[in-house]
Image (tube, rainbow, N blue to C red):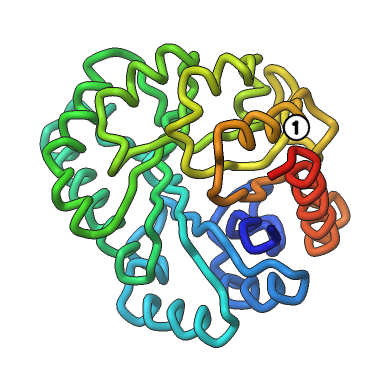
Amino acid sequence: MTSKIGFMQGRLSPIVDGKIQSFPWDNWQNEIILAKQIGLSLMEWTLDQDRLYENPLMTIKGQQEILILCKEYDFFIPSLTGDCFMQAPFWKVSDQFMCERLQRDFLSVLNACSKVGITLVVVPLVDGGSLDDIEQENCLVEFLLEQESKISDLGIKIIFESDFEPLNLRRFISRLSDINFGINYDIGNSSSLGLNPTEEFQAIGSRICNVHVKDRPVNGTTVPLGDGDANFPLVFDLLQSHGYIYNYILQTARASDDDHSSVLTQYRRDVEDWVRDSGS
């Protein structure tokens, strides 16, 4: 079970500029070592638009270092959260030149992921990346359909985190094949939106390929697990009943005392308990 529980990159590093999530430029290598020390062997990479092409994932030297570290520590990086796509979404840009530049960035990220064994790429359709109208949705979907053979050749599956209501999300994801596209289910985001987990799973349960574990109150921000409105026992029961076999990524609240290792260890145990209690 522990082998399927991972953490969001940066959760084992000091908070930078008050941001709950950002790439840990000064500590990314050390995070792998720290993670192994607390029994975690799986991590989701996070990529920002700022300094995009300086990120180690995007450089040949960095890719080589990632592969060496993963081999040395028996560590796995199966997924990436593309905060860069949310920060600079090509589907919301009216200028054609800028749109095409951001689309090239999108494909460059997918190509880089394929170099280090990342097979799941989370595209956040929330906050700055939220789809505001059908024109933006069509821009995104049509581009992905045009690039689907390339996405498939790279061995990548694009998975979406969304603020859609369940039936609207089902309508959206049905436009894309289940072979190359799926859903990233964020427990905290759903609780913040006040969504009913049972209705969500009825609509899109079969398309979920990755889970972000966090807690948020309705209309609120990330809080420690159990302090928000997420119904974890119900969600894990629903995951089990839908045959979920994929990973659980701790995208949890940061430690108030900077002891991020201890907090992440406790959150890992919480997930283990919920999974065990669900019968998975």
Q: Quadrant of the N terminus?
A: bottom right
Q: Residue at point 65% right, 46% down?
A: 251
Residue 169 point in image, percent of width and height: 41, 20
Q: Classify residue 231 as left or right of residue 174.
A: right
Disc 1 element = helix
Question: Where 158 falls versus 204 (above or below)?
Answer: below
Of residues 82 and 6, the one drawn nearer to the viewer in this rendering: 6
Residue 32 point in image, percent of width and height: 62, 74
* Whether residue 33 can be seen here: yes
Q: Residue at point 50% right, 59% down?
A: 45
Question: Where 17 falls versus 72 (above or below)?
Answer: above
Write down the quadrant of residue 168 in the picture.
Answer: top left
Q: Give the residue pinned by disc 1.
A: 232
Q: What residue type is labelled 1?
A: Phe
How many numbered badges does the structure rendering display? 1
Question: Where 254 falls versus 67 (above or below)?
Answer: above
